[in-house]
Amino acid sequence: MSRIPTVSLGDDLAVSALGYGGMSLSDVYGPVDDETALSTLVHAVDAGLTFVDTANIYGAGRSERIISRLLAHRRDEIVLATKFGIAGGAIGARTIRGDAAYVREQIDLSLGRLGTDHVDLYYQHRVDPTVPIEETVGAMAELVAAGKVRHLGLSECTADELRRANAVHPIAAVQTEWSIVSRDVEAGVVPAAIELGVGFVPYSPLSRAWLTDGFSPAQIGEGDGRPRFPRFAPETLAANAALRTEVLAIAAEAGLTGAQLALSWLFTRAADLGIPIAPIPGSRFAAHVDEWLPAVDARLSAETMARLETVAGRIRGDRSFDRGWTSQRGEAA
């Protein structure tokens, strides 16, 4: 196993500094069979990415079931995170649930699919606007008391929601999109996490592969979920093409691939802000995992960081299809 540093998030939760995002174990970015998905997952863990993240909604439980095949033999090596809160089918046709009954129901279903008696980190995937977060986190805290969950997390919460949740039970981690091109969380959520001693788990750190060398719009085929996001509409991809070329040129000058630059930027930015992070890139391909590894120890120069400072403000298109589903809904507060 490769040496990946360990980072302590909040609530004394120790994880590998680079994790693996299990959404890619389903067909969300293109078709993948179970054996290939499992092989990539095993390769990631062998490389030291022992912080494995999934959710009940990924592939309608498929991601959790694939991960169960790894856990059957290597449970003690894995810091396992899963989520509840998004119900329904296709992106854009889903609902959010945070009621206590749903919390209790979903942990048992996830544990059954994962084939384990506990998860190390349990997230509310999206905050239910119809249920006070105190009720949801109170029900999650009951799962900690029952031994089914070790630590609690929130995904795409606002700063206010994080403070209210943490008053009910310590929150170990916030998971929200954060990257060179998606920095809205720095306005409120990141400062609140620092204030409360909560760690951060950036998802989509490679902007759904847009920041990688190999991305091409031609890769987006039938069934790929990305076109539902405004930045992946054909006209938006075209408008942002020059900006992507600029970022990749900066990466090349730094001796890095686009993916390595994106991850190194996150580690550098988090260190500057003083917040512990564990990004969770995902991929169907083992070679991509190997590409990420050098970024764990890389830090960008002040000059390179300055050149990337304006990128997020210049990208066209929102990061989500609905701001009401992200922490952006709290930006005006």
Image (tube, rainbow, N blue to C red):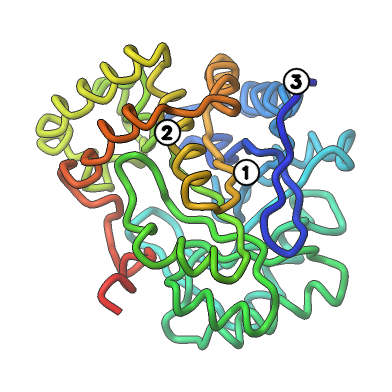
Q: CA distance from mark 1 to mark 3?
A: 27 Å
Q: Above or below — where is 141 with respect to 287?
A: below
Q: Identity of the amino acid at label 3?
A: Ser
Foreground residue, 34 or 205?
205
Residue depicted at 79% across the width and 41% down the height: 78
Q: Earlier in the sequence, mark 1 or mark 2?
A: 2
Please name the residue that numbered disc 2 is placed on. 29
Residue drawn 56% across the image and 50% down it: 201
Per the image, label 1 sits on a secondary structure element best described as helix
Q: Residue furthest front?
A: 302
Q: Give the image quarter of residue 243.
A: top left
Nearest to the eye among marks 2 and 3: give it. 3
Q: Name the residue that disc number 3 marks.
A: 2
Q: Nearer the viewer, residue 89 or 258?
A: 258
Left or right relative to 193: residue 315 = left
Q: Is residue 205 above or below residue 243?
A: below
Q: Earlier in the sequence, mark 2 or mark 3?
A: 3
**Residue 154: percent from left, percent from top:** 56, 66
Near-viewer residue (223 or 237): 237
Nearest to the eye among marks 1 and 2: give it: 2
Is residue 301 rendered to the left or right of residue 312? right
Residue that badge 1 annotates: 62
Are there few (<14), some (14-19), or many (20+) residues within 10 Å of tag 2? many
Crowd around label 1: few <14 · some 14–19 · many ≥20 (10 Å): many
